[in-house]
Image: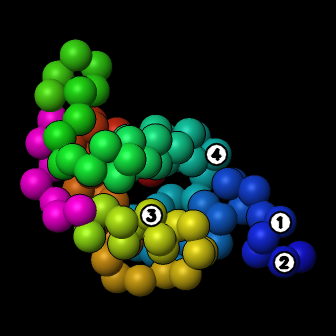
């Protein structure tokens, strides 16, 4: 099957095979989706701060780093910069991704 037909969960599983961070379970995928939503909002608003559960969180990452994480996911190509997703998930108190 071509990558263009892959669903979100398929991309997650392929990246979890290469990543040391992603666990590859469906429960972890649900947390990962929340992290992706935050990343998409950060890129759209061109900011590094996000209001999450009533708390303003400053991620301290450059916009290019955030875009790099999203590019890895969207293109389903693993890059070591993708591991920064652990930092973002920890700031959101989502331990299992």
**How far apart are the two marked residues, 4 and 3, measured between alpha carbons?**
20 Å
Badge 2 marks a residue whose secondary structure is loop
In the displayed structure, does residue 11 sit left or right of residue 90? right
Does any portion of residue 15 appear in the rendered image? yes
CA separation, marks 2 and 1? 6 Å
Q: Which residue does the numbered mark 3 point to in the structure image?
A: 70
Is the C-beta separation of discs 4 and 2 under 8 Å?
A: no
Q: Is residue 58 magenta?
A: yes
Q: Nearer the viewer, residue 25 or 11?
A: 11
**Can you give x and y, in whole percent of width and height, for residue 52 in the image?**
27, 26
First along the sequence among labels 4 and 1 = 1
- Tag 2 residue: 2
> Which range of residues does the magenta coloring cover?
57-63
Q: What residue would you read off at disc 1? A: 5
Query: In terms of sequence position, does the residue under pointer 2 or pointer 3 come before the other?
Result: 2
Q: Mark 4 = which residue?
A: 26
Most extreme residue toward the right is 1
Kindly report the distance in space between the C-alpha atoms of the residues bearing marks 4 and 2. 22 Å
The residue depicted at 12 percent of the width and 42 percent of the height is 58
Dot 4: within a 10 Å radius of its alpha carbon, few (fewer than 14), some, or many (20 or more) residues? Answer: few
Check whether the beta carbons of the residues at disc 2 and disc 1 lie within 8 A of each other.
yes
Mark 2 vs mark 3, CA separation in Å: 19 Å
């Amino acid at each position: 099957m071509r990558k263009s037909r892959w669903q979100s969960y398929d991309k997650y599983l392929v990246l979890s095979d290469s990543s040391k961070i992603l666990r590859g379970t469906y429960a972890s995928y649900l947390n990962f989706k929340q992290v992706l939503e935050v990343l998409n909002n950060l890129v759209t608003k061109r900011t590094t701060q996000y209001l999450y559960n009533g708390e303003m969180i400053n991620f301290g990452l450059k916009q290019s780093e955030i875009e790099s994480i999203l590019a890895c996911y969207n293109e389903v190509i693993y890059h070591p910069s993708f591991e920064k997703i652990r930092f973002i998930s920890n700031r959101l108190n989502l331990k299992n991704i």
